[in-house]
Amino acid sequence: MNELEFRNRLLQDPSTLDERMLAFLKVNPEQQNALRKVRERDSKIAGALKVQAPEGLVERILLKQSYQESAERRGDSQQVEMVTDVKDLQSERSEIGAPKKAHQGWQSWPYAFSGMAASLLVAVLFFGFWQSPQQSHQVLTGEDMVVHILEHVEHDPDLMKPQALALSESDLNKLFTKVGATLQQPIDSMSYAGECDVEGQRGLHIVMQDESGPVTIIVMPGPQLEAMVAFNESGYTGELIPVKGGLVAILGHSQEQLALAQTRFFKAVKFG
Amino acid sequence: MKNRHRFFEQLVSAYAKDLYRYAYWLCKQPTVAEDLVQETFTRAWKAIDKLNDEKAAKGWLITILRRENARMYEKYQPLLIEIEENLASDELRHEPSMDLEQKQLHQAILSLPEEYREPLVLQIMWGFTGDEIATELGLKLATVNTRLFRARKQLKDIYVSDTNASSKQATGNP
């Protein structure tokens, strides 16, 4: 082995040196420097490859699987297709600029969901237990949390009306910091953001507008869910999504709204 | 399989984030990457009883994801090509946790040809050996080694030229 071959082999795989490379290195100790440099660059590449995975990814996968299994048990393939379509539509709309096919898909949603609503009046899946640090004596289920959030949302319906966001970037950043989050870019279609109180817990109340109406997002620092909770109650379709240091509740009137709001929100906001 | 639920949950917990990263480097689009991971696990759940050797789970999931990526790419090819570069760069602008050097490296990796980038990701991120990469990608070991060599060589060249440009900028030299 000569130096050229040694260096070529380093660029193929610097982490494992075979006997010939080790022998060459023993005779040419100055080549340790080349080895060190390639390994350092690999370590930086490894760091760059480790892009941040989206918040709540694991929970969303498990939730989808539970939908899938529930549909399989009932022999209802329509529901499985629908759950898959949430992501399909989401990606078609946000990534492919809503081509014609995607529009047709969106238009068919109300019909798909009217059937769904009947079968999923209160489909609360994965009810994890959560416990607030401030209320350590009280253990509530995801169902309790849903009730609290629904009451809160219905308390001030004026917030749901379309309006221009009346906050500066700096004010918005402060609001998100208070709940342990970072706003990295503007949230598309956000019409309201403000502090709120849900059963004594300070949170962040956000309203987003889309073509089919308002979507509410509540960020609650403190309560921890073991897994994502999906529900369909009081005319709302919603999700409680565990995030670092708390949870995010998203409430709308259809799965398509939730999927779009979830994508927009988590694209802009990071936790932890 | 005794407890397929628990096993599935273990798979998701262990591999979802790395599969997302792998998908991201394949398709360069965060939302499509998540779709790919979701679809991968949907198919994995349906076929979980066929996974006899739990140690093979990693390669099995990668194989499913690669097939899904090929399927999706075929379905949306013209539109995906049109937006992929801009979208990946756009995402990066909003990643304050990355310093300049990481961002340059990130862009450099994105700019690698896919045939070089994929074996590099499998080796560095997933710890695959040359033989394992060759099997997964259906290539000869010599081809894999050549691609790994070229990937690192290109990154080194881009990295050195970017570092020199940054130093000149910092010192004000043309």
Image (tube, grey):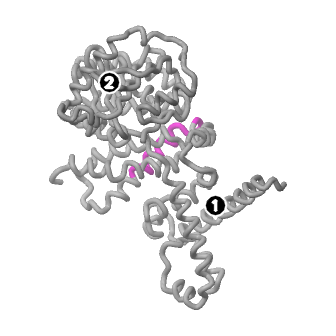
Tell me, yes or no, whether the two marked residues, 1 and 2, touch with CB atoms within 8 Å: no
Q: Main secondary structure of the magenta part?
A: helix
Q: Is residue B71 a member of the stretch shown in magenta?
A: yes
Q: Which residue is drawn at 43% across and 66% down?
A: B132
- The location of residue B129, given as percent across then percent down, is 45, 69
Closer-to-camera residue (A199/A142)? A199
Q: Is residue A251 a member of the stretch shown in magenta?
A: no
* Callout 2: SS: strand
* Callout 1: SS: helix
Q: Residue at x 44, y 26 (%)?
A: A261
Number of marks: 2
- The location of residue B136, given as percent across then percent down, is 44, 61
In the rendered image, the vertical position of residue B68 relative to residue A136, given as above or below: below
In the rendered image, the vertical position of residue B66 relative to residue A225, given as above or below: below
Q: Name the residue under label 1.
A: B155
Is residue A119 visible to the viewer in this orientation of the structure? no
Q: Which range is magenta? A: B64-79
Is residue A32 visible to the viewer in this orientation of the structure? yes
Mark pair 1, 2: CA separation:
45 Å
Q: Mark 2 points at which residue?
A: A238
